[in-house]
Image (cartoon, rainbow, N blue to C red):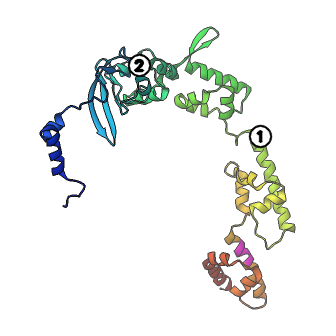
Amino acid sequence: MSVSEHLRPLHHILLMEFLKGSAEGFYKAAPDNEPYGNGPWPCINKLCRHYGKDGAEKISVSYLNGQTIGQFHCAECGMKYQRSRSWQTFEEYAGHAMKLDYGHLWYDKLRKCILEDKLYPSDVAKVMKSTKKTVATRAAEIGLDINVNSRTRIFDKKGERVSADEYYHEKVSEILRIHPELTAKELNELLPGTYAWFSKNDFQWLKERLVTDREKRYWAEWEQKQLENLKDAYSTIQKEGDPNRRVTIGWLCTVAGLRESEIKGRLHRFEDIRAFIGEVVESKEEWLERRFKVMAEKKKELGQEIVLADIRRGMRLKPNTYKKYALFIDDLLKELNG
């Protein structure tokens, strides 16, 4: 292996010996100027009594890509942090320093908030002097669920205190007596947060009592009305429409006076309309076969077979269409002439 001209170990060793007498002395030598000054250094744990004052000791100082990286540890709370801009004041780096370890004091406090004090997520964040996202992430790391106490939240009921379970079940039952056909969206508008609570605690109970938009009477009536319009449109096409034209959803909707997007966008929701569309709307292959059969019957009456030239002359297929369905067309011609 050749050594790069930019990598000259011998030169480096000679330079180390020139500066500090030996390579070992060079590595062990302390810098002439301490980049982060002299300790003790401030702790950045807001729960610690040394926060912003002292208590932290330097673990190491390293140099990487032109940056002076210092790592510090507070023996009082156990927090370890890292910073890379030695010139910044405490106020400038305290909120941005990388926390390598939140420390035993921080985690003990977090456990107490969730397990003993049974605080809600927002209150836990306030006590920990952190964001809800930070608290939730750190709680998950030690196997705790920051939302566990939200599920047993207590509500006032006419001067009494009831559990969240009793509160939500009774409230939903009251709403259902007034609105028997209730969707999840309507429930959330009437009682925000209810659907989310049931999703985590008793979703099956709620699912059995709610309806979807499709199940609502309004949409059931809408489907039947539009289905009748589409059926009438199909009858009109059969009687008065161009027999050579392919029956499509767009044609049906135009004759029925409906927007195509209005029907196509809801096909997945309406079984009856979907079944009717599947029955009368023609695929490209079905349309080609219907047209070919009509032409083949006429040729048969003349004692002739239908050939590709008849297809091209009679249907004026676009080149791309023939290219795409060439195999299907050839097989169909053989079948019709057989």
Among the two numbered marks 1 and 2 on one chain, the one whose residue lies closer to the N terminus: 2
| Viewer-side residue, 109 vs 324 | 109
Label 2 element class: loop
Q: Is residue 155 above or below residue 201?
A: above
Residue marked by disc 2: 46
The residue closer to the viewer here, 94 or 156, is: 94
Q: Amino acid at mark 2?
A: Lys
Quadrant of the snapshot with the C terminus: bottom right
54 left or right of 19 in image: right
Residue at the extreme front of the image, as rendered: 18
- Residue name at image x 67 percent, y 36 percent: 211
Provide the major secondary structure of the magenta segment.
helix
Residue 102 pos. (x, y %): 36, 25
Up-down: is 325 above or below 157? below
Q: Position of residue 142 (x, y in %)?
A: 36, 28
Residue highlighted by disc 1: 218
Question: Any magenta on residue 289?
Answer: yes
Can see residue 232? no
Q: Is residue 284 above or below residue 110?
A: below
> Which residue is outermost to the bottom?
303
Specify the segment rendered in magenta.
287-291
- Residue nearer the viewer, 63 or 305: 63
At mark 1, the secondary structure is helix
Residue 98, picture quadrant = top left
Q: Is residue 15 visible?
A: yes
Quarter of the figure with residue 281: bottom right
Image quadrant containing the N terminus: bottom left
